[in-house]
Image: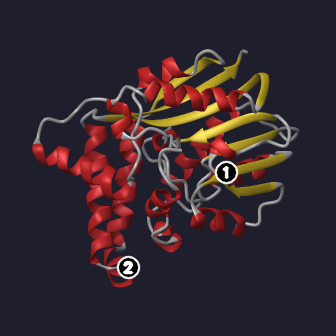
Amino acid sequence: MTSTQEQIDLSYSVSNDFFQLWLDKNMHYTSAVFSAADQSLEEAQENKARVLYDFAELNQNRRVLDIGCGWGSFLEYCTRRGIQQADGITLSVEQRAYAEARGLEKARFMLCDYKDFVPEQPYDGLVSIEMIDHLCSPAQAREGKAVELYRSYFNTLAQWVQPGSCFAFQAILRNRIPRKRQDLLDLQFTADVVFPGGLNPRLEELILAVNPHWEILELHTLRTDYGRTTAEWLRRLRLNEAFIRQTWGDQIFMDYDRYLSTCVRTFEAHWSSDVQMKLRRIT
């Protein structure tokens, strides 16, 4: 991965207790899927997990790998729905510890870069939820390497399943570039301080990169869903402002308030979006 383990830990390891204050109860740190105006964040995150479970065509007789499994949120959903084996890989020490502490039957969590991972046997389905932003740095994108890096990722994952198997893929997208200096500074802050070493792909880069081993069966964008998700995260963060400042310090609260406020603005202004794709291995 382009992002190092140290950078991943910086992004996700402030404290598991900190993230529990403002994420949903199952600790999904990715866009939810809202199906009603009055739906809670918890319900919308269940929707997201259901969509991806179905995209990967999973059931109680299948084995799944979650690439960039975070705190184990999606695999927890899989074990409730029924799964033969649920494996996850991550580069975050704290996230892996939290995932293992869930005590999920039929689930395993490994601290591993996807490039170094060797499956024991082919999986029946794959899932990756907003992990691909760690693969290409801004400098590499400027050098024209983005599609090459993403294609290498999709080609590697194709070797872990048989032809006909499905891959449920979700990614944050970058789109328009803001014109105001403060907006640019806020986006740079998010990239340099909260998620160093990474870059969100453009949709057209992903469309190019899935070839030659995958075909796109379904594609949905979630710009408004992610805007609503980040707005709810921000609301919950601010409800806990005093406790966060007392426990982790003023700077942590100010950094995450700035980051989440920027996210809300980003999705409102079409600077970013999010995509879910159902892919099927064809070669």
Q: Residues within 10 Å of mark 2 (few under 14, many from 20)?
A: few
Where is residue 203 shown, x and y percent of the image?
42, 25
Q: Is mark 2 on a helix, strand or loop?
A: helix
Above or below, 18 relative to 131:
below
Q: Does 233 sit left or right of 40 as displayed?
A: left
Q: Which mark is residue 89?
A: 1
Side of 128 where 10 appears, left or right: left
Question: As displayed, is residue 6 above or below residue 141?
Answer: below
Q: Which amino acid does label 1 sit on?
A: Ile
**Of discs 2 and 1, which sits in the foreground?**
1
Residue in view at x 27 percent, y 38 percent: 268
* Labels 2 and 1: the sequence-earlier one: 1
Specify how the rendered protein is coloured: secondary structure
Residue underneath mark 2:
248
The percent position of residue 255, horizontal first and vertical second, equals 29, 64
Q: Dot 1, how many residues are within 10 Å of its Cα: few (below 14), some (14-19), or many (20+)?
A: many
Q: In the image, 137: left or right of 42?
A: left
Residue 153 against residue 249 in the figure, above or below: above
Instruction: Return the mark for residue 1.
Output: none
Residue occupying image coordinates x 72% and y 57%: 109
Instruction: Establish if 257 lies above or below 87.
Output: below
Q: Tags 2 and 1 in contact by the CB under 8 Å rule?
A: no
Q: Position of residue 146 (x, y in %)?
A: 43, 29
Q: Kindly identify the amino acid type of the residue bearing the numbered disc 2.
A: Trp
Real-space Cα distance between discs 2 and 1?
28 Å
Q: Which residue lies furthest to the front in this view?
A: 143
Of 188 and 83, the residue lying toward us: 188
Q: In which quarter of the image is the C terminus?
A: top right
The residue under the point 25% across, 48% down is 188
Closer to the camera, 28 or 131? 131
